[in-house]
Amino acid sequence: MKISSFILIISMISFFASVSANDYSSYDYPSYDYSSMVLKVPNITDLSAIEDDLSYSLYHESCPDIEGIIYRKVKEWVTKDPTLAPSLLRLQYHDCVVRGCDASILLDHEGSERASNMSKSLRGFEVIDDIKAEIEKKCPKTVSCADILTTAARDATVLAGGPYWMIPFGRKDGRVSLAKEATIVPKGSESVTNLIEFFQSKGLNVLDLVVLSGAHTIGRTTCESVQHRLYDYKGTKGPDPSLDPKYLNYLRRKCRWASEIVNLDGETPNTFDTQYYHNLKKNMGMLSTDQLLYSDSRTKPVANGLSFESSLFKNQFGVSMVKLSSILDSTSQDDGEIRNDCKYVNH
């Protein structure tokens, strides 16, 4: 990688760190060591919780094997079905951007977030239920479903070849879940400006947007989310001209029906790597929101820089995931509970 590229990505990271009021005050962002030509990446273990409500030691005495229980269960499920790894990561994202990380996505009743059309392709609920049942045997009425979901998403990422990060605990399970509120989740056709504004409303910055979008290096989506780019882009009756021609032909063969499933990363769909960013360079971003990251001046330098540095991407992914999983709703925290069953509020 050229020195100029190093300097560009590091300066972008430093800039976004300085403008985000919710970044870690004690966290040293990556810096370029000109003497040894080594890129220094974040040390996740040095991070402290960014919310007073959360603590790394919460369950040390009350449920000391919580992380072991969750990891073993996630591994058991993901070994049988590797596609559950990205599904759990997506499940947590949908939970945290609506009402904060309060497990409201897990509530199963008429009119809940889970019942929304935006949630119809979400998977992994049975994994969380299985983990919860096991934890209740060992530590009854102690561990929230929100903390379980957050940890399961981390372990699923690790099992897919992604990074490990430490998780602060203490999220309460919310009592409210409304289908209409799930409509705020980005659908894959927004502008970069809309995405930036949405992330900023959650306390996340442009760097977080580009890094967390990299989760699309694994996982799948329904063809419904991409068909408009294949057949009638912006009412033209033709395809999105930014799509690579060979990739367009591939997607048209795969997506004859909206219900078909297609990989988000057409090159290495089962490996957590930087291929997602290389795909953007080749006009092979699956969703329009993916490809736009490489055409917008605010996001392209970051996407380009991350494509060259796997260790930087993975370490920063962990940092951004801690920020995402620390989005809390005051009502859920103040009036929340520890659910006995993740599907229902306690009575």
Image (cartoon, grey):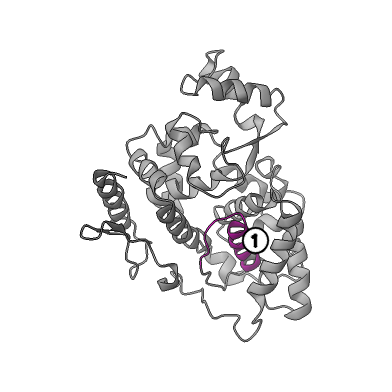
Residue 127, horizontal then vertical, whole percent: 74, 59
Q: Is residue 34 visible?
A: yes
Q: Nearer the viewer, residue 42 or 99?
A: 42
Asked if residue 291 lies left or right of residue 14, the reply is: right
Task: Indicate the secondary structure of the residue bearing disc 1.
Answer: loop
Q: Quadrant of residue 188?
A: top right
Residue 114, horizontal then vertical, whole percent: 70, 50
Residue occupying the far bottom of the picture: 61
Asked if residue 7 lies left or right of residue 236, the reply is: left
**Residue at the image point whose x is 26% and y is 51% from the top:** 11
Q: For the magenta stretch, what is the residue range? A: 147-165
Q: Amino acid at mark 1?
A: Ala
**Predominant secondary structure, magenta span:** helix
Residue 103, horizontal then vertical, whole percent: 65, 61
Q: Nearer the viewer, residue 119 or 56?
A: 56
Residue occupying the far top of the picture: 237
Dot 1: within a 10 Å radius of its alpha carbon, few (fewer than 14), some, or many (20 or more) residues?
many
State the count of labels. 1
* Residue 289 counted in the magenta span: no
Give the quarter of the figure containing the C terminus.
Answer: bottom right
For disc 1, the marked residue is: 103
**Residue at the image point whose x is 48% and y is 50% from the top:** 212
* Residue 151 counted in the magenta span: yes
Q: Nearer the viewer, residue 265 or 89?
A: 265
Residue 200, horizontal then vertical, whole percent: 41, 50
